[in-house]
Image (cartoon, grey):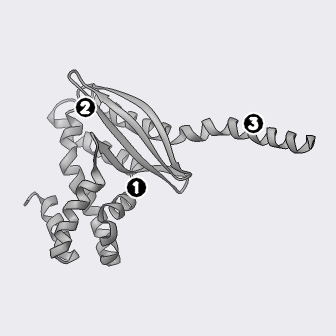
């Protein structure tokens, strides 16, 4: 009986010791990547229009480290992911990333030193977590939640929720509407035109 109790206490102590370290990894990962973005945006050597492309290149590198493009694409298409062939999926992943860049890069570059607060980490499962943050501006607070998944030993973002609007669900609604009336190739063609600035 005493041996069983000792083993139980030992396991509990190990669990309590490990848990805070493990639970902090998703938030630490998100914070580290966001800080890298902020370092680029705040770099005094990268001021003015001439440095814009250099900033974009640096931000693309961080994006690749931070986001899981395939997971983001699969969740955005939902059940429609299975209706695309393997080559179509590969092209969709590339095009969707480019569409997101065109939609959001200028907003990111317009950052003017707002404060970011990391509020809470919620473990959804052993391989999924949500990181609640908020951006504090002069006039308001903007809640932003990063949804992350553990892939290949690294925590990657697969969705971002800004003021209760999910990036994944927002685009899924648009793409579902298109695919309800059109074939996957036509969706890809729409995305190709968006990337080229024709839509």
Residue in the picture at 15% in, 35% down: 49
Residue that carries the numbered disc 1 in the rendered image:
68
Q: Marks 2 and 3, Cα distance to the nearest angstrom?
A: 49 Å
Residue that carries the numbered disc 2 in the rendered image:
46
Depth check, front residue: 195 or 188: 188
Q: Dot 3: what SS?
A: helix
Q: Marks 2 and 1, Cα distance to the nearest angstrom?
A: 27 Å
- Disc 3 versus disc 1: nearer the observer: 3
Q: Residue 147: horizontal and vertical position, in percent? A: 40, 48
Q: Residue 140: horizontal and vertical position, in percent? A: 23, 26
Residue that carries the numbered disc 3 in the rendered image:
13
Which quarter of the image is occupied by the C terminus? Answer: bottom left
Which quarter of the image is occupied by the N terminus? Answer: top right
* Circle nearer the N terminus (2, 3): 3
Q: Is residue 20 left or right of residue 150?
A: right
Q: Marks 3 and 1, Cα distance to the nearest angstrom?
A: 34 Å
Q: Rate crowding at label 3 as few (under 14), some (14 to 19) or many (20 or more) other CA atoms within 10 Å.
A: few
**CB-based contact (under 8 Å), mark 3 and mark 1:** no
Residue 53: name its quadrant. Answer: top left
- Disc 2 versus disc 3: nearer the observer: 3
- The total of numbered circles placed on residues is 3
């Amino acid at each position: 009986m005493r041996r069983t109790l000792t083993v139980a206490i030992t396991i509990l102590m190990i669990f309590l010791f490990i848990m805070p370290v493990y639970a902090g990894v998703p938030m630490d990962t998100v914070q580290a990547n966001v800080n890298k973005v902020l370092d680029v945006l705040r770099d005094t050597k990268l001021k003015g229009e001439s440095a814009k492309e250099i900033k974009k290149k640096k931000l693309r590198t961080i994006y690749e480290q931070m986001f899981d493009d395939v997971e983001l694409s699969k969740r955005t298409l939902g059940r429609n992911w299975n209706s695309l062939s393997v080559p179509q999926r590969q092209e969709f992943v590339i095009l969707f990333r480019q569409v997101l860049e065109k939609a959001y890069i200028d907003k990111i570059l317009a950052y003017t030193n707002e404060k970011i607060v990391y509020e809470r980490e919620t473990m959804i499962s052993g391989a999924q977590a949500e990181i609640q943050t908020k951006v504090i501006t002069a006039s308001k607070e903007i809640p932003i939640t990063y949804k992350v998944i553990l892939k290949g030993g690294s925590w990657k973002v697969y969705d971002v929720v800004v003021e209760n609007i999910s990036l994944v669900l927002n685009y899924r609604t648009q793409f579902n509407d298109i695919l309800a009336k059109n074939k996957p190739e036509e969706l890809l063609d729409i995305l190709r035109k968006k990337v080229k600035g024709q839509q």
